[in-house]
Image (cartoon, rainbow, N blue to C red):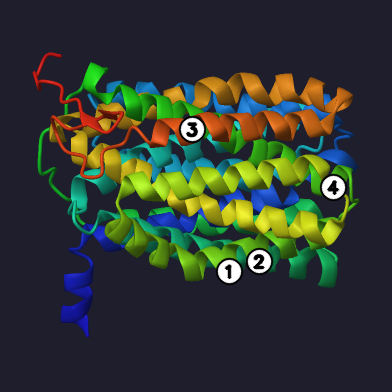
Amino acid sequence: MFARLRVTLRRPEILLLILGAGVPISFATWQGLLNNFAVERAQFGGVEIGILQSLREIPGFLAFAVVFLLLFVREQKLAYVSLLFLGIGTAVTGFFPTIVGLYITTVVMSLGFHYYETTAQSLSLQWFDKKNAALWFGRIISVGSFAGIVAYALIYVGIEMAGLDFKWVYLVGGGITVLLAVTAWILFPVFPAKVEQNKHLVLRKRYWLYYVLVFMSGARRQIFVVFAAFMLVDRFGFDAGTIALIFLANSALSMVLAPRIGRLIVIWGERKALTVEYIGLIAVFVAYAFVRNPAIAIGLHIVDHVFFAMAIAMKTYFQKIADPADIAPTAGVSFTINHIAAVVLPAAFGVLWLVSPAAVFLAGAAMALASLGLSRLVPPNPDIGNEVVVFGLRRPAPVHAAE
């Protein structure tokens, strides 16, 4: 038994699975309660929720700073510290039921969330074998989805059955994340890097398609995270318990489907997977714009969430075309690119929401259509020197270390 445990503790994939479970415990608790907590306790409207979501994305916009932190701290340790920030920020949220208080706790939570996601993506791409990376990403999503189920069940039981105040549910959710981070820090050894990572910002011309896909992904994500969930509360009047059940259904499906989606990406390749994702998203966003039936709205929200697992293809596409030493700095740069739109769009669309909620979702459909066109530029077999195809023709770029 102890010998098996020692072997398990020497596997970096297991560490990432454990840490990956800690993220949704906090974030699902924060997200599942957010709209009701913001409206009922902090008197938020569409403008305030848009501003809050823009503030939440600022740490993601500054994710490029991770590369400078790596001059002073190892990536693995930075992942632990970031997860602690996420847990602590979530745990104290309920104790500050004001507009300013919610803004501040959101930034603390978001700092931990985005810096953990940046370092975790980098470590995953370094530690996972290219042939099986999509499978492991699917497993991480599956474990995270199970953790999300635990969080949403905690919300439902705590709010609906036990009648707990928001602050105690936030405290438990954040506290579990803190406990997982500390336990992993103590139990797991420091895993050596396979390739020494560049510790300066990296922007390479041959990665341009990946950068653009990441940018469009950030814009699309805001429509779902901010306004699809807000619609369920604002338009259909769902309470916190109902929202928790919807998010629980999202997590249950992802837990089952994410590993299978990972296998499909291995079989299909990144080009086909991204194409399927964006065709589906166009249909979902157009439907969001005109939905009036609450049951259909719930179904759209669940389908939309499942499509997030298809984004594994974007990560494995980069893994295949990247110089191994570029992975850590590019993880930070890509998160910053992802959040350029994320910092601006929630506040801007919050104002647009007051004029026409349908226009917000139709803009999301237009973004998905643009992403569909970009996905067709991904080669069937991406590799270094085969990063982009145009009109079916391979357009290789020379590989230079200083490019």
Taking the view exactly as shown, the residue that stands out farthest to the bottom is 1
Percent coordinates x, y for residue 211 in the rendering: 37, 25
Helix, strand or loop at mark 2: helix
Q: Residues within 10 Å of mark 3 (few under 14, many from 20)?
A: many
- Which residue type carries mark 3? Ser
What residue is shown with label 1? 252
Helix, strand or loop at mark 3: helix
Q: Are marks 2 and 3 in contact (CB under 8 Å)?
A: no
- Which residue type carries mark 2? Ala
Percent coordinates x, y for residue 24 in the rendering: 54, 54
The correct choice, above or below, for 363 with respect to 312 in the image is: above
| Residue 170 can be seen, yes or no | no
Percent coordinates x, y for residue 158 in the rendering: 76, 66
Q: Are marks 2 and 1 in contact (CB under 8 Å)?
A: yes
What residue is shown with label 2? 249
The correct choice, above or below, for 253 with respect to 358 in the image is: below
Q: Quadrant of residue 198?
A: top left
Relative horizontal placement of residue 276, taking residue 3 as reference (left or right): right
Relative horizontal placement of residue 253, taking residue 201 as reference (left or right): right
What residue is shown with label 4? 233
Front position in the image: 267 or 119: 267
Q: Earlier in the sequence, mark 2 or mark 3?
A: 2
Relative horizontal placement of residue 358, taking residue 282 as reference (left or right): right
Of badges 3 and 1, the one in the foreground is 3
Helix, strand or loop at mark 4: helix
Q: Earlier in the sequence, mark 1 or mark 4?
A: 4
Q: Residues within 10 Å of mark 4 (few under 14, many from 20)?
A: some
Please report the residue visible at 15 percent of the width from the left and 80 percent of the height from the top: 3
Please report the residue visible at 39 percent of the width from the left and 66 percent of the height from the top: 259
- Which residue type carries mark 1? Ala
